[in-house]
Image (cartoon, grey):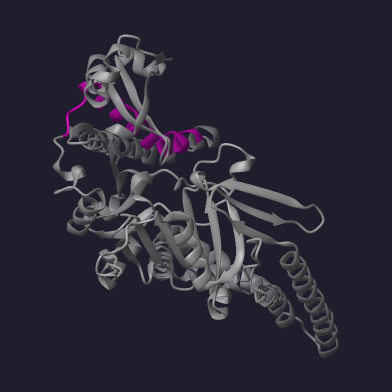
Amino acid sequence: MSSPEDGWRRLDARTVLASAVLALGACLAAGVPVLLGQRGRDTFAFTLGFIGTGVVLLVGAAAVIEYVRLARTRFRVGPERVEVHSGILVRARTGLARERVRSVEVTADPVLRVLGLATVRIGTGQKASASDKPLELRALRRPDAEALRRELLERPAPPDPADVPPRDETLAVLDPGWIRFAPLSALTPALGVAGFGALLQGSDWFGLQRTVLDDAARLALVLGVAVSLVVAVLVVAAVGTVASLAVFVESWWGYRLTREPRTGALHVRRGLLTRRSTTLEEDRLRGVAVVEPAAVRWFGAARVDAVATGLSRGQEQRSDPRGLLPVAPAAVVDRVVAEVLREPAAPTTQVVLQAHPPAARTRRVRWASAVCLLPAVALALVGLAADAHGLWLPALVLVLLGLAVGTWLGRLAYRNLGHGLVGRYVVTRHGAPGRRTVALRRDGILTWTLTRTPFQRRAGLVTLWFTTAAGEGAYGVYDLGVEQAMTLAAETLGDRFTPYLAETRVVA
């Protein structure tokens, strides 16, 4: 990375090699299965020549395009602005005020890691317009990328009297035992089913898809319907478990959460193949969210996400930078939440949650029961259309089961529903069978809004929304009584906002 007198810098020339290697990998991934599926020496030779020619052309084109992009791209970091000049056919000159920089993410895929390079993505937070699209610099030398991250995010600090830079404070590191929670994710069954789809696709490349399906059908006939279903569930669970373990390891291997002692900035490093490095300035932190999916919560674990400006998830972001802690035991979660927020104890556990009106429980039981009755309704409609009287008994069983499960889920959702105030934070919790607890700083709340659906109006309930320039933008306290919502708004927002509470804005 050169530094001419005018301050303009160039990307690293090895990005051309990285693009060529990535193009080669994509060509091989698509071409090798096609080549292996050929039958006959002449056909194989023709296909090999055709694929080889295509690989050479595509890899060469990728290298040439990247070389031209490299030659046409330069950037400059000034005292007030970050400027990037890029474009091959259409030249683009992008400028970003440094005061608008909210996040700098440093990532390196396996190819870039081997070459000692990294990509720097400079974001402004929530996307409000096309001009807010993150600036991406691919690729820089890894030390230069880290230096650029520090240059953009860190604030000048007074010199240390001992002239020895203080070491970062470590808040959390990966415990290999946490991997046991990975199969509890809802992603596990989806990955198991995806594995079956990958098997069918791979067999189709080799012309064996029909054989695989026929063998599976014959095995199902031998084992019977019940045993076949059990075997299928076990296979999907096994494949999904292995895949979820692999996803967890790739995403969180080498995880470390640290705090920079001079600025208080939080720094998250993680990733096995693709290394990710995200920095969060302390003054942009507005709270945390403790997420407890159903199976994870039953095993006493949860994960922690940041509620902060500049870390909202958008289509332009390739990873979710909000994660502060992977799924970990509850004791670790409470400790990390307290240390991240600089509180003696975690607000998410110290708060005394206030109950919501009984009408909120009734609404949850009704909605959960309605959803759980859908399979029974579908089976009854099939029986009615086909005039199959034998389906009425299973439909009745599903009705009874649906009512029981719906009632349980609705009551569970009500038990998980609550809100409260503790110190500087307003805490809200909801969800079933999993739940989500958000601790939001009261001084970070910008506005408040009461909303009411027609169903809520009949029940005398409202939802109170707290709007903040961080995270999801608005966090709701669901199904409150009107007076209860007004009291919570007054206590949360303080005396400065009290005169406006009489002008309640209810959106129907």
Q: Quadrant of residue 371?
A: top left
- Horizontal side, residue 211 vs residue 259: left or right: right
* Image: 403 above or below 320: above
Q: Is residue 377 magenta?
A: yes
Counting from the top left corner in percent of width and height, residue 18 is at: 65, 75
Image coordinates for residue 417, horizontal then vertical, percent = 24, 33
The N terminus - image quarter:
bottom right
Please tell me which residue is depicted at 43% across the width and 59% down the height of the picture: 278
What residue is shown at x 37% (from left), y 51% (from top)?
281
Residue extending farthest to the bottom is 41
Q: Number of numbered discs present?
A: 0
From this view, report whether residue 121 is shown above or below residue 234: above
Residue located at (76% from left, 75% from top): 59
Q: Quadrant of residue 163?
A: bottom left
> Which part of the image, by quadrant, shows the C terminus?
top left
**Residue 500 on image: x %, y %:** 32, 13
Q: Quadrant of residue 71?
A: bottom right
Horizontal side of 169 relative to 376 (left or right) equals: left
Q: Is residue 73 magenta?
A: no
Left or right of residue 92: residue 463: left
Can you see residue 433?
A: no
Residue 299 in percent (x, y) is at 22, 57
Magenta highlight range: 353-381
Kindly tell me whether residue 387 is visible in this rendering. Answer: yes
Of residues 29 and 326, the one nearer the viewer is 326
Q: Main secondary structure of the magenta part?
A: helix
Task: State whether residue 8 is above or below residue 298.
Answer: below
